Image (cartoon, helix red, strand yellow):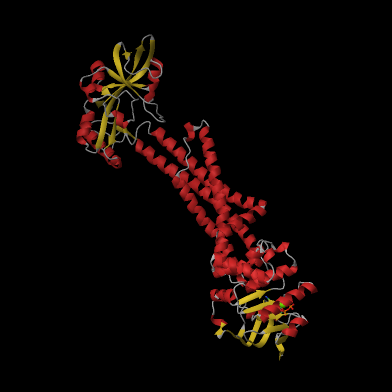
Amino acid sequence: MIDMNNIKKVYDTGKIQVEALRGVNLQIEEGDFMTVVGPSGSGKSTLMNIIGCLDKPSEGEYKLNQKSVKNFNDNQLSEIRNQDIGFVFQNFNLLPYASAYENVEMPLLFAGMSGKKRRERVEYILDRVGLSERMGHKPNELSGGQKQRVAIARALVNNPKIILADEPTGNLDTKTGENIMQLFIELWKEGNTIVMITHDPRATKYSEKAVKLIDGKIKNQTMD
Amino acid sequence: MLKNILQVLRELKKQKLRTFLTLFGIIWGTVSVILLLAFGFAIKAQTSESMHGLGESICIMWSGKTSISYAGFPRGRNLHFQKGDAEFLRDQVPLIGNISPQYSRSVAVRVKDKKQSFNINAVLPEFTKMRNLVPRMGGRFLNQLDEKKRRRVVFIGFDVEEKMFGKGNGLGKTIYIEGMPFTVIGVLIQKKQDSSYNGRDKDAIYMPVSTYLGIYGDRYMDNMVCKAENVEYTDQMKDDIQLAYARKYRFHPDDTEALGIWDTTENEKFLNTFFGGFNIFLGVVGVMTLIVGGIGISNIMYVIVEERTNEIGIKRAVGAKKHLILFQYLTETFVIAGLGTIIGFLISMGIIALTNQLPLKEYIGTLVLDPVIAMTTIIIIVMITLAAGWGPATRASNLDPVIAINK
Ligand SMILES: Nc1ncnc2c1ncn2[C@@H]1O[C@H](COP(=O)(O)OP(=O)(O)OP(=O)(O)O)[C@@H](O)[C@H]1O
Ligand SMILES: [Mg+2]
């Protein structure tokens, strides 16, 4: 499903050029649970952004479903992010003024789904992550774990082909983090494809593929 | 869309001071444009109404003194309009639509034991059209039959009526002019008049030329009043009159002092040019204020975009297209500007209503919210808002999603 060939990413910050990725080769198949580990600054988030079509590689070939991402324009990339990718971030990234329901509904609005179907879908997904009681709450009325559940529901709502999670438990206490990790494992078992940046040993235990990034390069790619 | 607007309003409510300052700019601008132009238009209408008190696009002619020696005559010869001159000109100059001689003199007038002196003017019936001498209901101006039969009838100004009979009591009564009884057949309606020659119409008495000549037998008339058949040919008509007259009285055709012509269309042209310029000036001042308001909105929108960078990043990350973000922020700009415009219109209408209550009618006339001004203002605001919102909205839509979401 995902095929990356010699991906490089260079950030040009005026004087210095930062080589965040220096030739990454990566394959992800449907139903995979892949974890990405590596020290801070090794390029994990950069790789994730490229996989999620939020950013473009400076060099190399990235094929998503056999199609080269290079050829897509901004509108098409937006559609891919909307339809095929579900993002979960470390710091939740919820709209502060919008309720849990409205936050989850947002991608469906961009997809142009009709009102009735939207309502059904949002309610179903919020129920799935265990938040049907909290639909009308604003992010500041929710705990960290609940916020992350809203974010996961938002990532799932358009039935994406792949879920990308960048340290989804990084801002949560151990107990809550455990629950969230459990939720991801369940989602994977239900057939979702998941790529997760994490140092959580539970995740690495379940994942079939573990990628270790060091200095913008993949050190080893193990298969369980 | 509706949701979008509600969110904008919610945001505006939260940031009260900022909202107030932003709206203030646009409100101030709207009120400026509308009020400045409303005042400008009203003053123009008022001035033009009092100017028409004298008559619309008429020429008043006096005979003068030659200033060029011609055909054996020395310069400095006195010329006089004489009986038959009006008919002569009407005959010679086809461009003339109406023409009337005007004889006048000051006479002693009496009604019962009230005595006072007034100007009487002997004129032809068509004088009413040229000089806006409109009779009050129930009365009439001098007509052809009066002229033909030398009737002893008069048409009087409303001040003459008030002084001699009391307000509204003159019609049909008898008035004694140097001892001779005349019937009042009409009284002038109230009107404004800002310019005149030999006295205001409200203080004058009008009688048929034939009656007048029968009594006084003047050799010379004081002046003539004429109006072109088609106002656009007034200049041509004046030239033709000059030529015809020069031929009859044998003065040099270029002698500008032999015949004096006061062309009120000139006043009108001046008035139009003056107020045209004045209103453009007022409009420009108002639009400048609006532009300043627009710059205020633009700045606020930049601040809002800056504050919502993370939000924009989130939306882009979950699939919002660029043009959607662009549209959202343009809409927001329009909601703010629209709110300011509505408030501005309400305030302007309030001020207009209040001003019309004040006793200022004589100077500024009646203020109205002219639909053309209103539409023009709205169109200008829309354009300014588009310009004000475009910068911030494109900045918002062009944000790099990765950078934006990490803000
Ligand atoms: N927008 C950017 N401009 C310039 N340099 C950047 C930018 N984003 C990332 N970098 C640099 O690229 C390198 C990789 O960053 P990245 O965020 O991918 O690391 P990471 O592995 O996710 O680290 P962490 O574990 O701290 O999240 C770092 O050196 C970082 O400073
Ligand atoms: Mg990172």
Q: Position of residue B167 (x, y in %)?
A: 41, 19
Q: Position of residue B209 (x, y in %)?
A: 25, 22
Q: Is A165 situated above or below B202?
A: below
Q: Position of residue B126 (x, y in %)?
A: 27, 29
Q: Residue furthest right?
A: A174
Task: Please tell me in which quadrant of the rendered image residue A177 appears.
Answer: bottom right
Task: Please tell me in which quadrant of the rendered image residue B155 appears.
Answer: top left
**Quick one: A181 or B199, which is closer to the camera?**
A181
Q: Is B6 situated above or below B90?
A: below
Q: Residue at x 69, y 62 (%)?
A: A138
Ligand 1 - quadrant of the structure image = bottom right
Residue B407, visible in the rendered structure:
no
Q: Is B109 situated above or below A38?
A: above
Check the picture and name the quadrant holding the C terminus of chain A.
Answer: bottom right
**Quick one: B71 or B200, which is closer to the camera?**
B200
Residue B167, visible in the rendered structure:
yes
Q: Residue furthest top?
A: B113
Task: Please tell me in which quadrant of the rendered image residue A196 appears.
Answer: bottom right
Check the picture and name the quadrant holding the N terminus of chain A.
Answer: bottom right
Q: Position of residue A61 (x, y in %)?
A: 59, 86
Q: Residue at x 55, y 46 (%)?
A: B344
B114 sits to left or right of A16: left
Numbered circles on residues, count: 0
**Quick one: A173 or B176, which is closer to the camera?**
A173
A67 sits to left or right of B11: left
**Quick one: B172 or B160, which is closer to the camera?**
B172
